[in-house]
Image (spheres, coloured by chain):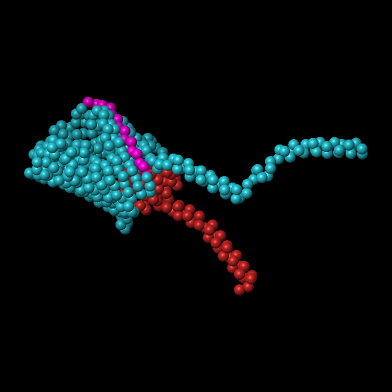
Chain colours: A red, B cyan
Amino acid sequence: MTKHSSFLLSLAGALAVVVALSFLPACASAGTEARAVVGATAWQDNCGRCHNFRSPGDYSDANWDVAALHMRIRANIPAEDIEAIRVFLQAGN
Amino acid sequence: MDRAIQKAAICLAALAGLAPSIAAQEPEPQEEYVTLEEFDEAMEEMEAMKDLLSQAQSGSRNFLLSGFLTANYFDTADGPSAFGAGFNPVILWKVSDKLMVESELEMGAGGGGHGGSTIELGYAQVSYVANKWMTIGAGKFLSPFGQFNERFHPSWINRLPTAPFFASHEGIVPSSLIGAQIRGGGWAGSGQWRYALFVSNGPVGHEEEAEGVASEEGETEFLDFSGSSVQMQNKAVGGRVAYLPMPWMEIGVSGMSASVPGDEIADMTLLGVDLTATKVLDSGTLRVDGEFVQATLEHESKDEWEGGYGQVAYRPNLGESIISNFEGVIRYDWLGFPDGIPSEDEPKRWTAGLNYWLNATTTVKFAVEQLDLHDENDISFLLQLAIGL
């Protein structure tokens, strides 16, 4: 391998790392958005079956953390659903 | 030329004189700018300070004060018209991601309650999330038997100002239990399942409960489920399983069994079915709820009670129109007593209500109820303001 080609290879590798790193937050963000979309449906299905919908703005993020665990226990809401509902409510306040 | 040189010299002298003061006004570059390393260091210090502040507020961010407030004016056929009030603060404390402490205090005064002023512990329980399918709880908790007591009892959730007979304080199902429970839920294909299993202090008879005598034949009252009697060495076991074939519909089956102390030990059995369906349509929201409970007490004879309700509520969706704030409700509920008690002593009731929602958790309810009891049809008027906190 010539000096030139090894340099190009190193450059390509560094570029790949930079591209991958820059893509990571986007992946996380897309995951959060996807969960919020799932959460909107779960919110409508689970919360609305018993009571009117509280607005996401009614509580702070910390309060929704507490309310979500409370409702998971009270209504036996599956873990995946309540997590999606929490993300949705916190994204919307 | 000399004048020009003279002017230039004066300007230079003036500039030379001003220079120190101008220089003094200019900030030192080192004071205005920081290096990237210094910036990172400052940010780290700020984060550390935020952490310290957060620790100083430990616990406060994991609390939530919730609950509900109720104001009534009941003009009942069998009693004087009266105002009443209730306040049920609920304290929620998320100790950690897996540990929850919650408590409700029930405070009431005036009409619409038990009369006078009352303060009771609604529930006080600690729950631990063991895994995604199971939560373990202990303390005093809302009875998971059926749906009404656990899900619909708060006044801002209950669509009418009163509770159905079977779920009231004189009813046949416990509103709360003292003991331990496991509960949870999950997905099963396109549907979901729910469960709750409990062991609790057992019931005793209302009459002479201190002596542990079970309800005698011919009595209309069922059992005392408060779990606070001195005769609580007996235990009750029970639970509820439910299936949601569609996300907006839940169908449940409940059971409870206990031995009731007395001169002669009696066996108590409670069986119940319940249904809740809330369908959001383009034209509005339709809610259908119902529950049926059968209670059996076997000692010398076999006495059976039964009770239930069916309810339909509809709230139109007409956009910004004020009509969208109204909700119509109609409910039928009844209570049946053991053989030997005249059927005219069994209460049967129709209630029609109109609610006006000020926001998602505040409503003004107006209801008219017709009570069929002792061969009389009594009409009562109920007005209630309910605020969910």
Picture coordinates of residue B183 (x, y %)?
28, 50
Which residue is pictured at 27% across the width and 33% down the height?
B119
Query: What span is colored magenta in the figure?
Result: B80-94
Q: Main secondary structure of the magenta part?
A: strand
Which residue is most to the left?
B300
| Displayed quadrant of residue B226 | top left
Picture coordinates of residue B99 (x, y %)?
35, 47
Q: Is residue B198 left or right of residue B41?
A: left
Which residue is most to the right?
B1
Picture coordinates of residue B346 (x, y %)?
15, 37
Which residue is pictured at 42% across the width and 49% down the height?
A87
| Residue A4 falls inside the magenta stretch | no
Residue B282 visible somewhere in the drawing? no
Which residue is pictured at 57% across the width and 46% down the height?
B42
Picture coordinates of residue B178 (x, y %)?
24, 43
- Image quarter hosting the C terminus of chain B: top left
Residue B362 visible somewhere in the drawing? yes
| Residue B84 falls inside the magenta stretch | yes
